[in-house]
Amino acid sequence: MRELVYTETRDLKGFRKKYDVFRFYFWWWVNNLYSRIWLGLDIEGEENIPKTGRGILVSNHLSFLDANIISAASPRKVSFMIAKEYYEMTAIKWMCEFLGCIPVNRSGQDIAAVKSAIKNLNKDFLIGAFPEGGISRSGDMEDTKQGIAMIALRTHSPVIPVLLSGYHYQPMFATFALPKRIKIKIGPALEFRDEDAKNRESLARVTEEIVGAIQKLREEN
């Protein structure tokens, strides 16, 4: 297991900063033990997560567990782009805040969320994103949006494809309470040096390549 790396996602000082560090390490270890023991988590390709610098972990979206699973596989703090209605839930808002998550309004194009993601990446944070915008009930990637491609191109960020497998959508209680056999597979980073964030065809190509890389991980699984 690689050494944990704390990322300061909020401007804190003194006791508040020490508490934020403690909370991250405590939560990471609890989440990691829960994921490995109760959920039977098997991790492949952990070395593909960059040790330093910016990056976007882009994954298929199977259940409410997905952010926890990706966080358990990453030795760095991952700031997820998460639906605003979940971000504001009392039960998980505390976690979203110290992870530096970005609330996203799914009812339309959320310019504020895009700006926040770009700002975080320009600070060399690690972002987690689900381009489907919602949980897939079928298990297949459906209706992928181009927002992640645009953010990646505007910040010159590598995209790390992630495949989650071994489980499926369930009601929230069953998702967290029932044991599972979950696998996460992390592929090599994708770089897009010759594409243009302002060009629709470029955005379509990049989105297709990201989805294709996740699908390739599924075929190799």
Image: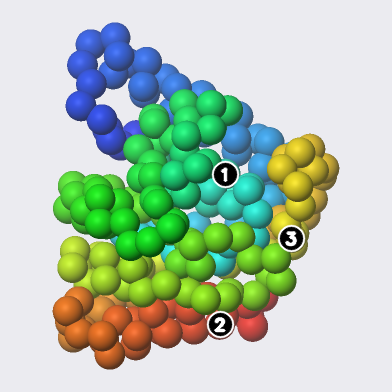
Q: Circle 2 is placed at which residue position?
A: 216
- Under tag 1, what secondary structure? helix
The residue tagged 1 is 68
Which one is earlier in the sequence, the residue at label 1 or at label 2? 1
Q: Mark 1 against mark 2, which lies toward the viewer?
A: 1
Q: Earlier in the sequence, mark 1 or mark 3?
A: 1
Question: Up-down: is 100 above or below 21?
Answer: below
Residue at 57 percent across and 80 percent down: it is: 215
Q: Using the numbered discs, state the Cα–Cα distance from disc 2 to disc 3 in whole angstroms.
A: 19 Å
Residue that lies at the very extreme toward the right in this rendered image = 178
- Please state the horizontal and vertical placement of residue 54, each as a whole percent of the image: 26, 56
Q: Residue at x 55, y 60 (%)?
A: 134
Q: Residue at x 45, y 67 (%)?
A: 131
Say which amino acid is labelled 3: His
Secondary structure at badge 3 equals loop
Q: Which mark is residue 168?
A: 3
- Residue flagged by tag 2: what amino acid is it? Lys
Q: Where residue 127 appears, x then y in whole percent? A: 36, 53
Would you identify the image quadrant in which residue 13 lies?
top left
Residue nearer the viewer, 205 or 6: 205
Judge from the rendering whether residue 67 lies leftward or rightward of residue 15; answer left or right: right
2 and 3 marks in contact (CB < 8 Å): no
